[in-house]
Amino acid sequence: MTLTKRDLVVRISTETGMIQQQVLDVVQKTLDHIAEALAKGDKVELRNFGVFEIKLRKARVGRNPNAPEVDVPIPQRAVVKFKAGKEMKAAVLKLSPTAPSQKPPAPAQ
């Protein structure tokens, strides 16, 4: 399931009793400020959630799998990276399947 901005607004509105339009305005302003900070090259740190930061990807040479003899230059570019915070990592880690149980060795005959 995907959690959308609309889903967030409805859930927050229900939990807080605030009008959905007010919640939408707050959520949108929050996202606008995060995007604005990243566009300036600033790091955005949200405690217990994670850190958004801008990283530069090096220029490199790519290849078209359909025409591998042709090199395609890929220029350097800035990308947004997200590193999950400690609490989020712990919550997501709970989704990991447990290690598969190993079959006991067959008895020797």
Image: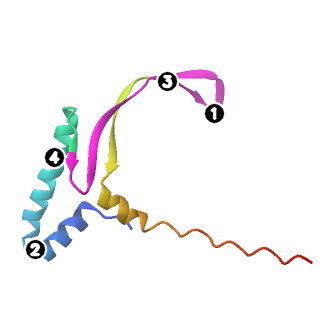
Task: Please give the range of residues in magenta.
Answer: 45-74
Mark 2 falls on what kind of element?
A: helix
Horizontal and vertical percent position of residue 39? 21, 35
The N terminus appears in which quarter of the rendering? bottom left
Question: Label 2 belongs to which residue?
Answer: 16
- Count the marks: 4
Q: Is residue 74 left or right of residue 81?
A: right
- Residue toward you, 66 or 27: 27
| 46 is within the stretch colored magenta | yes
Residue at the spot 18% in from the left edge and 50% down from the top edge: 31
Question: Label 4 belongs to which residue?
Answer: 32
Q: Amino acid at mark 4?
A: Asp
Question: Label 3 belongs to which residue?
Answer: 60
In front: label 4 or label 3: 3
Q: Amino acid at mark 3?
A: Arg
- Which numbered disc flags the more N-terminal residue, 2 or 3? 2
